[in-house]
């Protein structure tokens, strides 16, 4: 199912939640609902959150795969795309396997020149990796213990990726004391801001 | 690391375990917030890097009093011990001035962050905080290659340690802070790895490092030469 039609269905369900006070969605995964500040962890909520992560991993995996396929990057940027792309592919596979029939569909993507032009590639990689860290961190308290353990194994790798790409272009890799979390809505906005999603 | 230390491993391991025990559970954190006087808090905020104030603020929303679990205090003290180790290591490297170029900058920036982590954890724990152990890095900070190799080990260890403990934390605010420190340590690890000349991210998944395993690893270095004890001296009364 395309990202767009899911969003309009989620709008309908969102109004239903406001009106009815309860989400009677059964096993349906709904993207785009804002996460309540103190949502109690549950398997159903894990599914929603992991699908948010899956969206990001889809974008990342496809981004690096296209960069590798086009073969325009050189030197350490090329190595970065190869190594990191391999990781994102494994993250994607892990999340799809975990979610099974509940996994969201691959979004339609268009990376423009970001997979060939070094500066655009760096900007894209940085945006995606930092958003990944903030997304997982933002949902950590909403996950069940098992899903948290799984997410934790991934988020630190995304953080390594983010520091690595900064290092390559001569930026300070890590100056902050903590990594700020993002809400689900902020994560979606950040992904859309890359311009890579085609609706 | 060197064979001459092997004889002392058992002794240091025992000391380290005692360091990591919960010694003053529950009410200490609430008291700690009341007792941090303005001057030292302002001093910390001046010294900390950009996120330090945010970290302190985040930890100050930790529920106080009886709702604080003894388990969480214990885990925070364990984290504090690892942060003491890292911060002392970078601080000494900076002081000794044997590093050059990018490695030197890394020690300064990462050291400032680890020191901020120490201060934030100490503030959150108050009287329950384990005191700083004493360290002997046996010349490791005097050699750039040894420094980088050790920094990689410390940062990778911190990532694994925070990762193993995160699902065990009861308090959601503490979990949020711990998980946001955990990813910062991973950035440090990538940074130091690249400086050392190895791939910043070797695997798609980072694995947790259990507490017994982390304790063994730290003990095997011989860097901790005496265990800390709980702070016993009285804190100044809240003046704000």
Image (cartoon, rainbow, N blue to C red):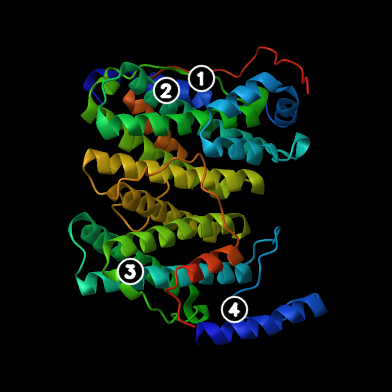
Q: Chain of mark 3?
A: A
Secondary structure beneath disc 1?
loop
Query: Any mark on residue A29, and which?
Result: 4
C-alpha separation, residue under disc 1 versus residue under disc 2: 9 Å
Q: Number of marks in the image?
A: 4
| SS for dot 3 | helix
Mark 3 and mark 2, same subunit? no
The residue mark sitting in front, 1 or 3, is 3
Around disc 1, counting alpha carbons within 10 Å, would you say few (fewer than 14), some (14 to 19), or many (20 or more)?
Answer: many
Q: CA distance from mark 1 to mark 4?
A: 49 Å
Q: Let me know if residue A29 appears in the view.
A: yes
Chain of the residue under the numbered disc 1 shown in the image: B
3 or 4: tag closer to the N-terminus: 4
- Compared across the picture, whether A11 is left or right of B211 comes to right
Write down the residue under mark 1. B132
Checking the image for residue B88, the label placed there is 2
Precedes in sequence: disc 1 or disc 2: 2
- Residues at marks 1 and 2, common chain? yes
x%, y% of residue A41? 65, 62
């Amino acid at each position: 199912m395309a990202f767009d039609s899911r969003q309009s269905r989620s709008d309908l369900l969102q109004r239903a939640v406001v009106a009815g006070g309860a989400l009677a969605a059964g096993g349906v995964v709904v993207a785009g609902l804002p996460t309540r500040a103190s949502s109690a962890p549950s398997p159903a909520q894990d599914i929603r959150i992991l699908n948010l992560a899956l969206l990001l991993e889809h974008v990342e995996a496809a981004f690096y795969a296209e960069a590798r396929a086009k073969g325009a990057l050189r030197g350490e940027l090329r190595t970065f795309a190869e190594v990191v792309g391999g990781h994102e592919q494994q993250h994607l596979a892990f999340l799809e396997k975990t979610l099974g029939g509940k996994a969201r569909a691959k979004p339609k993507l268009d990376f423009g020149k970001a997979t060939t032009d070094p500066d655009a590639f760096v900007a894209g990689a940085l945006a995606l990796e930092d958003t990944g860290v903030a997304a997982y961190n933002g949902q950590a308290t909403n996950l069940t213990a098992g899903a948290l353990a799984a997410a934790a194994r991934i988020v630190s790798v995304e953080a390594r990726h983010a520091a690595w790409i900064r290092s390559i272009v001569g930026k300070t890799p890590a100056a902050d004391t903590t990594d700020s979390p993002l809400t689900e809505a902020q994560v979606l906005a950040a992904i859309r801001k890359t311009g890579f999603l085609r609706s | 690391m060197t064979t001459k230390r092997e004889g002392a491993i058992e002794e240091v391991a025992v000391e380290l375990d005692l360091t990591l025990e919960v010694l003053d559970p529950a009410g200490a954190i609430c008291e700690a917030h009341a007792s941090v006087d303005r001057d030292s808090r302002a001093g910390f905020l001046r010294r900390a890097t950009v996120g330090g104030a945010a970290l302190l603020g985040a930890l100050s929303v930790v529920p106080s009093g009886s709702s604080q679990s003894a388990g969480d205090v214990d885990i925070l003290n364990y984290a504090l011990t690892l942060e003491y180790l890292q911060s002392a290591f970078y601080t000494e490297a900076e002081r000794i001035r044997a590093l050059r170029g990018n490695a030197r900058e890394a020690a300064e920036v990462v050291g400032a962050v680890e020191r901020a982590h120490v201060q934030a954890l100490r503030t959150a724990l108050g009287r329950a905080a384990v005191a700083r152990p004493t360290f002997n890095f046996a010349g490791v900070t005097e050699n750039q290659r040894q420094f980088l190799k050790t920094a990689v080990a410390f940062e990778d260890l911190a990532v694994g340690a925070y990762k193993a403990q995160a699902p065990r934390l009861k308090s959601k605010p503490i979990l949020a802070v711990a998980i946001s420190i955990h990813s910062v340590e991973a950035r440090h690890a990538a940074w130091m790895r690249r400086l050392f000349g190895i791939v910043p991210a070797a695997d798609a998944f980072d694995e947790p490092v259990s507490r017994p395993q982390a304790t063994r690893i730290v003990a095997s270095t011989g860097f901790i030469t005496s265990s800390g004890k709980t702070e016993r001296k009285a804190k100044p009364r809240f003046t704000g």
